[in-house]
Amino acid sequence: MAESAATPGGPTMAEEGSAMRVDVVTIFPAYLEPLRLSLLGKARDRGVLEVHTHDLRDWATDRHRTVDDTPYGGGPGMVMRPEPWDAALREISSSGGPAPRPRVIVPTPAGRPFTQACAAELAREPWLVFCCGRYEGIDARVIEAWADDEISIGDYVLSGGEVATLVMVEAIARLLPGAVGNTQSITDDSFAHGLLEGPVYTRPPEWAGRRVPDVLLSGDHGAIARWRRDQALRRTAQRRPDLLADVELSEADRRVLAEVAREAAASAAEPTDADAAPASADAR
């Protein structure tokens, strides 16, 4: 009924005592194959993450394996029936996971926004179940009875919850202890300190006439740290200024932001091509 991610011969949750279990219920189990790849696959191999995918149709009771029906009140599309969902969640919840009950999450555009802080919150849970809706969504009574969270990954609509689940599981899993080889890469991520991450560079030192900033080649770790902080502040001020309201700023930070503001004001005051163009005859 379910595909298990347990790795033969590898460490188990009981042996490690810290693995997170994730169950995903969907009508398209193959959609979740990326959970076997890259960092997620390595986390599973290391016993940090245990993933099970389940086909909702396994809990349908008719020969056509029906999981949807027309909406009450009319309207387009179909709605996922409550009975298969209830049966699936009851069986999964009673399967002997790492907690008395999993935290049940429904990805939906109507949910609370998914952020790095939300990912960190969910990374502290021992057991998560994601319910991937399709069509017009899951019968609201299932949400009322089972869901601990309704979460949105953005202000747009997808065809189902599978993509949103992949996004959330990847963001959550990389925060688990032992999931990422170099933990410094997590602490330097965008949003880790409330700021967007600045630009990064590697070899060669010059490419296509563009040089790596000299400070990064200087070996001066203090200057490099300050440069990276300044670049993160600049990028955040230019692209996501709303984030700065929640960031604790030093005097040096404030000087950088003041400089960015002056540069933006000067750029806005420069004449554009349209300003410099002569008036047409029709405008006289």
Image (cartoon, grey):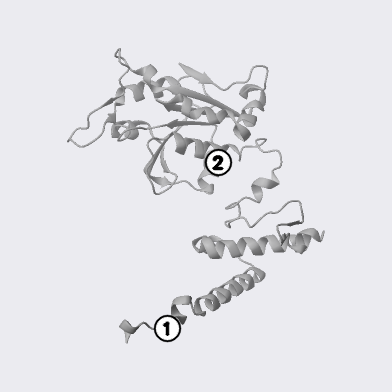
The structure residue drawn at horizontal position 19% and vertical position 32%, both measured from the top left corner, is 72
Using residue 145 as the reference point, say whether residue 25 is left or right of it.
right
Using residue 223 as the reference point, say whether residue 5 is left or right of it.
left
The location of residue 224, given as percent across then percent down, is: 75, 60
The location of residue 45, given as percent across then percent down, is: 65, 26
- Mark 1 residue crowding within 10 angstroms, few (<14) / some (14–19) / many (20+): few
Residue 171: image tag:
2
The structure residue drawn at horizontal position 59% and vertical position 21%, both measured from the top left corner, is 6
Q: Amino acid at mark 1?
A: Pro
Furthest residue in direction left, as rendered: 73
Q: Amino acid at mark 2?
A: Ala
The Cα–Cα distance between marks 1 and 2, rounded to whole angstroms, is: 53 Å
Q: Which residue is mark 1?
A: 278
Q: Secondary structure at mark 2?
A: helix
Q: Secondary structure at mark 1?
A: loop
- Hey, which quadrant is residue 35 in on the image? top right
Q: Nearer the viewer, residue 128 or 98?
A: 128
Is residue 197 shown above or below 128? below
- Mark 2 residue crowding within 10 angstroms, few (<14) / some (14–19) / many (20+): many
